[in-house]
Amino acid sequence: MAKIIYGVAGEGFGHSSRSHLIGQRLIDAGHNVMFVGSKKSLLYLKQYFGPPKADVREIFGLSFAYVNGRIDKSETLKRNLLNLPEGNKLNDALFKNYFEPFGPDLVISDFEPFSAWWAWRNRVPFISIDHEHVLTLCELEHQTKNWFSRITASVVTECHYVGAVAYIVINFFDAPLRIDSAVLAPPVVRPIVQGLQASRGEHLLIYSTSGKGVEGLQATLGKFSGQKFCLYGFKKSGEYNNCVFKERSTEGFLADLAGARGVIASAGFSLLSECMHLKKPMCLLPVAGQYEQIINAHYIEKLGLGVSAEKLDEDVLGRFLNQIDKPMPSDESILWPDNDKFFGILQDVLNTLHKPISIAIS
């Protein structure tokens, strides 16, 4: 049995859901796992892990500041710098009272920098498992107009941590790698999504992360009276012409996702992966200034998996509807979600450790 610390970034649902899946596999294989998270990931992990199953501890985490639906880089920097002194105190206590007595054999980081830096300083092997490192460890196509967001995202990713034994870069398309310690792996999806039965319904599913601009959105959707829309993420519910606004519900959302004709959302990696698993065409609207999402949307369109745009208007929606019924592409460079293949890659990486760790379940 190995003792493993699993650090999870606090922003975004994808880090938490992915770590839930991988962490559960480690526990099922008999290992002792301590999870550390902040903000959203801390709340998520506490729902599923706790004594005697596992330990969940709070770590100070970085956060984004959003203004008018986009990341405000200066406000993000200001907020994190202001919170850093108190955050360092929290982390120092965590390291002294929990990390050191635990004596981990391995640290895994899903874009969580402070547990990774602790591992590096204390010569504990650590592995990076995330999607963000696609920006720095893969050779990509970049558009000149996004140069500032690209540079900012690359610097942040580069500075997150160094010295991992391996970087498992989870991605949905094949791309050349820049370093020998990096390996590409396909997306993973939650068991609850694996259990869904996909069907081809009549509605388009719309998911908003900001919940803003509802009046303008309704006006645009109203021009397509023959198309039904199911909308999540807005502070309203009820049916308005061809729009059905629904309250937050995991079960309801997944049912509508499984039966959707197509999906309109931002370009977050978690939902994107679930759409691919269910073979749903996508119209992706990346959050302004978030370069990871800009890259995701670009490659979704390039690979024929959907369309991308900066905002949803009549022309974009018309373009999406005109190609929504095309067959799913069979491009060999697409990495379709595959949990078994991912865990095979993870096992190969764990086998390279000085003290190999098995994730086989007896």
Image: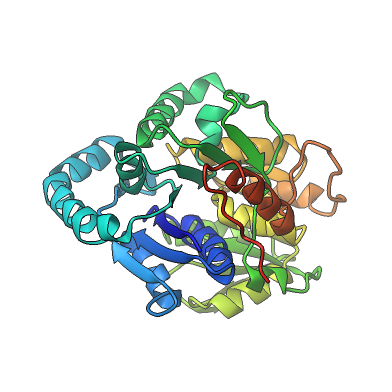
Colour style of the rendered protein structure: rainbow
Number of callouts in the render? 0
Residue 27 higher or lower than 157, as above or below: below
Residue 61 higher or lower than 22, as above or below: above
The picture quadrant where one finds residue 121 is top left
Evaluate whether residue 297 shows in this view.
yes
Residue 356 higher or lower than 20, as above or below: above
> 311 or 148: which is nearer to us?
148
Residue in view at x 87 percent, y 51 percent: 327
Evaluate whether residue 240 shows in this view.
no
Residue 68 higher or lower than 135, as above or below: below
Q: Quadrant of the C terminus?
A: bottom right
> 320 or 23: which is nearer to us?
23
Q: Residue furthest front?
A: 355
Q: Residue 268: percent from the left, percent from the top? A: 54, 50
Asked if residue 135 lies left or right of residue 225, the reply is left
Residue in view at x 73 percent, y 58 percent: 340
> 61 or 243: which is nearer to us?
61
> 129 or 207: which is nearer to us?
129
Q: Residue 159: percent from the left, percent from the top? A: 35, 31
Asked if residue 241 lies left or right of residue 160, the reply is right
Q: Residue 351: percent from the left, percent from the top? A: 62, 46
Asked if residue 291 lies left or right of residue 308, the reply is left
Q: Residue 190: percent from the left, percent from the top? A: 62, 66
